[in-house]
Image (cartoon, rainbow, N blue to C red):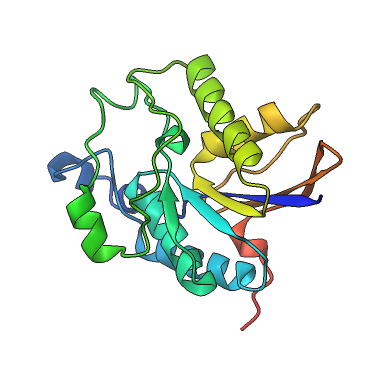
Amino acid sequence: MLQNVWLVRHGNRYDFVYPDWFLTALRRYDPPLSDDGIIQAKQLAKRLKSEKIAHIFSSPFLRSIQTANEVAHSLNLSINLENGLGEWLNKDWMTETPELHTPQELTVRYPRINWDYHSLVIPKYPEDDTTVIQRTGDTIQQLVREYSQDILIVGHSVTVLAAMSVLIKYPPEIKASLCSLTKLINHKDQWKIALNCDTSHLTINN
């Protein structure tokens, strides 16, 4: 049976546009999307509107949730938060385990989140480069095994890179830029890349 896995890196981050935000932010390691990041997410939703995606899995970081939420609204699907798809807990980027938005806050703003879903993997701070690729790759492999229909995975650059490392035998050079879109096709237990592009290159059907 043919299965498609869509991989998306979140849209542009607010702190990439306004670096000083980090200095006073309540949750400095969990920034939202920037204004143009929201536009990217809406463009992504339009591109995926006609696809037969059955399940959406997102990193629990706000920027990924916001990106996934636009697609979930377009496809009328729920969002499953998977900790195993979360950001690299790199001690050079973060001084402690990042504080994320609470379920109470997220429920009000993003009612499409499915709170009955339970994460397959819980990462532990800190992680080195080998650890983050392994835990993210393990998460993706479990999702592919447990869900046979087409799935969308929304995460970070490491999410796309980990998918390549565990699913593609000889992974090529790929784009993992902000809001990049990658499509993998599994036919007879062999994964191939069918699409890998930046948001700016997406074909938008109005």
Q: Is residue 205 left or right of residue 130?
A: right
In the picture as drawn, the residue positioned furthest to the right comes out as: 188
- Closer to us: 179 or 53: 53
| Residue at (81% x, 27% y) in the render | 170
Q: Is residue 109 positioned above or below 115 on the image?
A: below
> Dividing the picture into quarters, in which one does residue 86 lie?
top left
Q: Quadrant of residue 84?
A: top left
Image quadrant containing the C terminus: bottom right
| 175 sits left or right of 109 in the view | right
Q: Is residue 5 visible?
A: yes
Pick the front one: 112 or 145: 145
Q: Name the residue rendered at 52%, 54% in the picture.
A: 56
Q: How far across and down, in percent of the image, does residue 202 sit?
A: 66, 65
> Residue 5: x, y in percent?
67, 49
Counting from the top left corner in percent of width and height, residue 200 is at 61, 63
* Residue at x 62% of width, y 46% of height: 147
Q: Say if residue 13 shows up in the picture.
A: no
**Relative to residue 18, is residue 187 drawn left or right?**
right
Labels in figure, total: 0
Q: Residue furthest bottom?
A: 206
| In this view, 32 is above or below 97 | below
Q: Nearer the viewer, residue 184 or 90?
A: 184
Answer with the quarter of the image where residue 96 lies: top left
Pick the residue in front: 206 or 80: 80
